Image (cartoon, grey):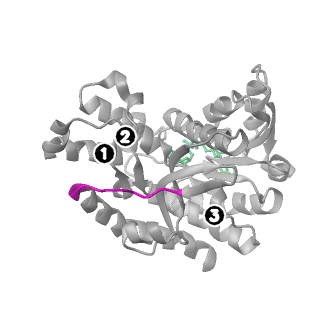
Amino acid sequence: MVVAAVLGAAGGIGQPLSLLVKQNPAIKELRLFDVVPVVKGVAADVSHVDTPAVTTGYVKDEDGLKHALKGADIVIIPAGVPRKPGMTRDDLFNINAGIVRDLAQGIAENCPKAFVLIISNPVNSTVPIAAEVFKAAGTFDPKRLFGVTTLDVVRASTMSAQAIGKPNDAAQYTIPVVGGHSGVTILPLLSQSKPALPESLFSDSVKLKALVNRIQFGGDEVVQAKAGGGSATLSMAYAGYKFAEQLIAAAFEGKKGVVAPSYVYVADNKDVQKEIGQDLAFFSVPVELGPNGAEKLHPLGQLSSYEKELLQACLGELPGSITKGVNFIQQPK
Ligand code: NAI
């Protein structure tokens, strides 16, 4: 059975995510960590749910990180500050970069073999930060580090179903979303939807562009509607758990053929580099999950000419975000 830890568990994402993780019968221990003491109350609350996971809460100032992480199999990180109206995910870098660095250090020391799922934004930079910390500690395993981009995948299904007038059918459409997790770096491959989206969508370029834009900037709809109260939390908890559930099934329960897009280390993968036409260290691709984590990276496949344009826009921004994360560790100011 699995030991899971949620870091930042008292937050807007952390609380509902912890509740969802508690429902997974494969989990025997659920450890909730945060810098604010209310996390102990969150843990007490969640612990009353009648599922197997024994749930405990830990705060930073009581050596809590160590206790929360010791021997954990899977660590999910929604710690950090969220966006307010007018902010991009990059604006969060200054605060969240240090948070992710310190949490990654804790993982390297206490559970170096854990699967690490990073939700904290900007994901395009925080995943490279964690990788650099793990490399310096000698614990980096590229198969075990994931940037969670599942909310983009979930939004692609929901918004595409709405755009074609089938708002109740969101779950039927599986659409790969690749690239990164921020604005134009988010690259929804609508042409590869299964089942296929109607031809009328692709022949109406105004409608198609509006849909792509809505998927790329869907987070802004929530930020604006919450009007200063934060960014997506409930849909993110749903998406974060969806990915965690897929990983748990593939890694610990022997489920085969589980493929989900995630922002992973691709520097060693010549096929991916060739497809994107650049040497990039991180990119979100459909990942086949298994006992070791990211067992196999699937190709992006055939892109439409419009999607090729979107890829170029993604490549205009993503390398800088990766470098920013790498430099934060390699050249600290
Ligand atoms: P929130 O402010 O409600 O919660 C964040 C929690 O992290 C708080 O409880 C806070 O005390 C805690 N925290 C801060 N520093 C910490 C540390 N050093 N160790 C442990 N916990 C710490 O924020 P919310 O809405 O839950 O968002 C969290 C993060 O998730 C943000 O960076 C946000 O941008 C990101 N996010 C990512 C998405 C994605 O698709 N990957 C989607 C939506 C949000």
Residue, disc 3: 142
Seen in the picture, residue 139 relative to 63 is either above or below; the reply is below
**Foreground of the two, 211 or 56:** 211
Amino acid on which the number 1 mark rests in the picture: Leu
Residue, disc 2: 156
Residue 16: image location, x then y, percent:
61, 31
Give yes or no for contact between labels 2 and 1 (Cβ–Cβ under 8 Å).
yes
For residue 221, which quarter of the picture? top left
* Highlighted range, magenta: 297-306
Cα distance in 3D space between marks 2 and 3: 26 Å
Residue located 37% across and 50% down the image: 86
**Element under disc 3:** helix
Residue located 63% across and 44% down the image: 247
Q: Which of marks 3 and 2 precedes in the sequence?
A: 3
**Foreground of the two, 57 or 147:** 147
Amino acid on which the number 2 mark rests in the picture: Ala
